[in-house]
Amino acid sequence: MAEEQEQTTGVEEHCGKIVVLGIDGSDPAKYAFSWYKDNVHDPTDRVILVHTVEVNEVLHSKQWQNSPYTFDKNVLVKMLEEEKEKIKKKLEGFAQMLTECKMNGTVKSVHAANPGEGLVRVAKEVNATVIITGTRGLSAVRRTLLGSVSDYVLHHSPIPVVVCSHKDS
């Protein structure tokens, strides 16, 4: 799959928290970012927005449904290039969020079996102080059947985790 990508905003010296924040463009992720910005952010913090690309995401796209038993190398290469471009545009948009909020930080795209795994791995790599993530507000049954990023992070993170649930969830 495509290599991991990263976008960095104005890097300054920091002595505050290293915050890993899960971001995917969804409303719960945007709420988590806003909550952090409004309630916890300190100008000395280094914020790492993590966009996790699930390994199976490309392989299970609609384009493969048309021909489940054959693999055309050119089609696969084209799909991966298109996905890489989509990821790059998302990262640029997330980096713009950091810039607009005058936050020191990085936007990073990582590949993982699931988003929670990607968040925990990045947090360990950068010696993060805290992980912040949003939640979709699933019921216990749906969380069990569908899986939950926040549940995964809560159970596997070696550092504190803040799960931001919007009051309307």
Image: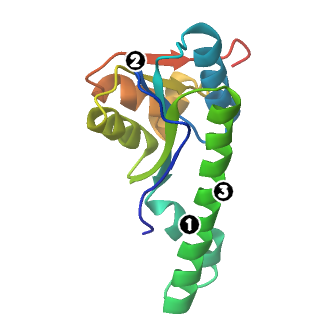
Q: Which mark is residue 17?
A: 2
Question: Mark 2: which secondary structure?
Answer: loop
Q: Which residue lies at the image location 68% right of the left edge and 46% below the top edge?
A: 93
Residue 65 lies left or right of residue 2; in this view the side is: right
Q: Which mark is residue 34?
A: none
Q: Nearer the viewer, residue 156 or 22?
A: 22
**Which numbered disc, 1 or 2, marks the residue closer to the eye?**
2
Q: What amino acid is found at the position of numbered circle 2 in the picture? A: Lys
Question: Mark 1: which secondary structure?
Answer: helix
* Above-or-below relation of 60 to 165: below
The residue tagged 1 is 84
The residue tagged 3 is 89
Separation of residues labelled 1 and 3 (CA atoms): 9 Å
Q: What amino acid is found at the position of numbered circle 1 in the picture? A: Lys
Q: Which residue lies at the image location 69% right of the left edge and 19% below the top edge?
A: 169
Using the rendered view, name the quadrant where residue 165 is placed.
top right
* Above-or-below relation of 74 to 151: below
Q: Which residue lies at the image location 57% right of the left edge and 23% below the top edge?
A: 139
Sequence-first tag of 1 and 3: 1
Q: Nearer the viewer, residue 51 or 42?
A: 42
What is the tally of numbered marks visible in this picture?
3
Percent coordinates x, y for residue 107 in the rendering:
52, 42
Residue 75 in view: yes
